[in-house]
């Protein structure tokens, strides 16, 4: 998830992140791929295992600063 617009799953498929509404059912593996359910604004839902190299999500915080978030450290992520 370190890409700003897409992530690669373990099958080398692209998962485009521009329409993501929420991420849930996130696996809590300390290393390796992160498996989660991705729900999109258009109603679609995809289960994917994101490769270890993409397991960082950059979150824009208060005052415009970005923070790195390991998705395995949270249970659910909702986007506006």
Image (cartoon, grey):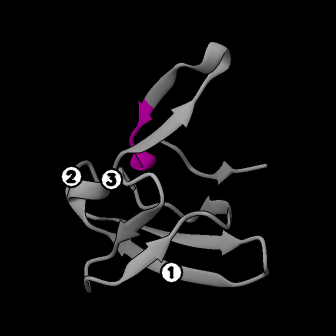
Q: Which residues are magenta?
A: 68-72
Look at the picture and state if 25 lies above or below 57.
below
* Residue at 68% across, 60% down: 22
- Whole-percent x and y of residue 75? 57, 50
State the image quarter where residue 17 is shown: bottom right
Q: Earlier in the sequence, mark 2 or mark 3?
A: 2
Please, what secondary structure does the residue beneath circle 1 have? strand
Look at the picture and state if 8 lies above or below 45.
above
Q: Residue 55: give its label.
A: 3
Cβ atoms at labels 3 and 1 below 8 Å apart: no
State the image quarter where residue 51 is shown: bottom left
Look at the picture and state if 50 lies above or below 60.
below
Q: Residue 31: give its label.
A: 2
Nearest the eye: 28 or 16: 16
**Residue with the mark numbered 1:** 47
Cα–Cα span, label 2 and label 3: 9 Å
- Whole-percent x and y of residue 13? 34, 84
The quadrant in which the N terminus is found is: bottom left
Nearest the eye: 65 or 51: 65
69 in the magenta segment? yes
Please, what secondary structure does the residue beneath circle 3 have? loop
Q: Earlier in the sequence, mark 3 or mark 1?
A: 1
Cα–Cα span, label 3 and label 1: 15 Å
- Whole-percent x and y of residue 78? 71, 51
Query: What is the number of callouts on the image?
Result: 3
* Residue at 62% across, 52% down: 76
């Amino acid at each position: 998830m370190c890409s700003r617009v897409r992530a690669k799953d373990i099958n080398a498929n692209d998962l485009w992140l521009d329409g993501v509404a929420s991420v849930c059912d996130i696996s809590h593996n300390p290393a390796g791929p992160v498996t989660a359910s991705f729900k999109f604004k258009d109603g679609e839902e995809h289960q994917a295992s994101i490769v270890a190299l993409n397991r960082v999500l950059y979150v824009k915080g208060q005052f415009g600063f970005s923070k790195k978030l390991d998705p395995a450290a949270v249970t659910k992520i909702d986007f506006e």
